[in-house]
Image (tube, helix red, strand yellow):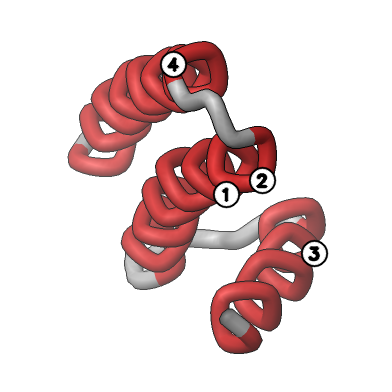
Amino acid sequence: MIMKTFAKYDFYIQLLILIIGIISIFTIDNSFIEGLSFYFIVGISQLISYIMKLFFKGEKSVLFIVYGIFIIPIWIFL
């Protein structure tokens, strides 16, 4: 029950953050900075969401694990 509620709210929060990230692309003049702002706005929220889902009990899909293999090293590098 908690996971279903979290998934519903997480979806809408991620959608809102994606829209904010897209808006940031059009409101910032420097192309390098707008790319970074989009990456950090959307990426940080996805990382937080992934880590929260990681600690929920239950079976994790292969796609979920593969996604983590790609997202975690990128943030460690930064």
Q: CA distance from mark 3 to mark 1?
A: 24 Å
Q: Amino acid at mark 1?
A: Leu
Residue under pointer 2: 32
Q: Nearer the viewer, mark 1 or mark 4?
A: 4
Q: Residues within 10 Å of mark 1 (few under 14, many from 20)?
A: some
Q: Is residue 46 above or below residue 78?
A: above
Q: Amino acid at mark 2?
A: Phe
Asked if disc 2 and disc 1 are in contact, CB closer than 8 Å, the reply is: yes
From the viewer's perspective, is the residue at label 2 or at label 1 nearer?
2
Q: Give the amino acid at mark 4.
A: Thr
Task: Report the amino acid beneath label 3.
Answer: Val
| SS at circle 4 | helix
Q: CA distance from mark 1 to mark 4?
A: 13 Å
Residue linked to disc 4: 27
User: Is residue 71 toward the left or the right of residue 12 in the image?
Assistant: right
What residue does disc 1 label? 36
Front residue (pair 54, 40):
40
**Mark 4 touches mark 3? (CB < 8 Å):** no
Question: Which residue position is annotated with label 3?
Answer: 66
Q: Quadrant of the N terminus?
A: top left
Q: Is residue 4 visible?
A: no
Specify which label sits upstream in the sequence, 2 or 3. 2
Residue 73 x, y percent position in the rendering: 68, 82
Q: Nearer the viewer, mark 2 or mark 3?
A: 2
